[in-house]
Amino acid sequence: MTSALSTTPVIADPVLQNEKKTHGLWSEVAIDRDDFSALRRRAVIDGCKWDPQVGDVDTLSPFPLVMNASTWRHIASLAEKLTAEATAAEDEISQRPELFAHLGLPRALRRVLSGKAPVTPSAGRVIRFDFHHTIQGWRISEANSDVPGGFSEASHFTALMAGHFPHLGTAGSPADIWSDTLAAAAGPSGVIALLSAPAYMEDHQVNAFLAQRLCERGCRSHLAKPEQIRWHDHAAYLDTAWYRGPLDIVVKFYQAEWLSRLPGKCDWKYFFRGGKTPVANPALAVISESKRFPLVWDKLATPLPTWRALLPETRDPREAPWSCDEGWLLKTALCNAGDTVSLRESMKPAEWLRTRLAVRLSPGNWIAQRRFESIPVPTPMGPRHACVGVYTVNGRAAGVYARMSAKSVINFEAADVALLIEDDE
């Protein structure tokens, strides 16, 4: 889509620009306030970014982060290696059901994943790896393997921001690449259901944005919830007031553990095993989604050298000194958007006490992870810690969803920021 916004070049701040000489990541100055106001409206109306402000806090940054092209190629290559290793490990674990008990998955989900029925076919695979620049170099905090989001911010908002910096480019459009993949899986005029939980607007806006892109590709897209899927002879049908009929693929922006809580009459097991209709993301994605994934590495024949190099040391909380050593943090096995990342110094005493109790009562649902020291980036808003979420689609790097925060922990409170690429050749 062609931007109608001004493309007047923005004069860079030399103090901010100096960062690229040392880190390969820096920020530009903010664009004009009126231009950003227009851009923000475009993000809301055209890009389904329905939460540009939460309370008194803007969630869209008026300036971009910039990465040099050589750094982008480096972390993109790492993300592709991580993807290849993860999918190989998932395949091995799927053949060894005794390992599911180590992943912190709900019992009902473990039972289905351990079943004998064939794994439901995949309509494609998208993963987002969250990279952080640390004093030890680039590291990852986790992989968003099951239901990664951020497509509008990483694609539409980033493209709008790039229009103001003609000397910079983007790392790609993950929304376009993912939509192309899904449309190819659905076939000409394919019928696609995109599932999310109605109570979560941030999930619904992801599916609404993807539905637009899929319609542009000739697909018939329907927003729905899992309870509206019916399985006849192991094939998925949608049963809503606006469409009743068979589906070519199902896209679930609905966590695997949430599906396992649905009543048995929903036949949710077919999303994972025994289904004939392709599903995205596929069933085995929940394996590397689990933050306890590293606890089974030593039991595998599959080598994971890139994961071992980039993910901080991760242990069962019963085997780490997290209660007396602030060099460790805690998170649940199926932590989403950093919602259960727990650091003692950033929590109120009562919150920390509740977390300690939860870990003691259910240690198999938690991990302890060694902390890394991220390097803040100077920005027009002051120093900010950045998280660079690199997407892979069917194993190939496909773009970036970037966020930043004044705090070292990047969670749901972080602001979205466009990441642009500067050619350094």
Image (cartoon, helix red, strand yellow):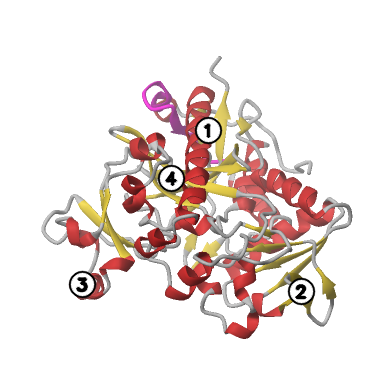
Please tell me whether mark 1 or mark 4 is closer to you in this view: 1
- Whether residue 212 sits left or right of residue 421 in the image: it is right
Question: Residue drawn at (35%, 52%), measured in percent from left and top?
Answer: 296
Of mark 3 and mark 4, the one earlier in the sequence is: 3
Query: Quick check: can you spot residue 133?
Result: no
Tell me if residue 65 comes above or below residue 95 in the rendering.
above
Please name the amino acid that badge 1 sits on: Ala
Quadrant of the frame with the C terminus: top right
Tell me, yes or no, whether the two marked residues, 2 and 3, touch with CB atoms within 8 Å: no
Please tell me whether mark 2 or mark 4 is closer to you in this view: 2
Over which residues does the magenta segment extend? 18-31
Which residue in the structure is indicated by mark 3? Answer: 360
Please name the amino acid that badge 3 sits on: Arg
Q: Is mark 3 on a helix, strand or loop?
A: helix
Mark 1 Cα-neighbour bin, 10 Å: few <14, some 14–19, many ≥20:
many
Which residue in the structure is indicated by mark 4? Answer: 387
Report how far apart the C-alphas of labels 2 and 4 lie in the structure. Answer: 44 Å
Q: Is mark 1 on a helix, strand or loop?
A: helix
- Asked whether 9 falls inside the magenta stretch, the response is no
Please tell me whether mark 3 or mark 1 is closer to you in this view: 3
- Whether residue 134 sits left or right of residue 86 in the image: it is left
Quadrant of the frame with the N terminus: top right
Mark 4 Cα-neighbour bin, 10 Å: few <14, some 14–19, many ≥20:
many
Of mark 3 and mark 1, the one earlier in the sequence is: 1
User: Any mark on residue 233, and which?
Assistant: 2
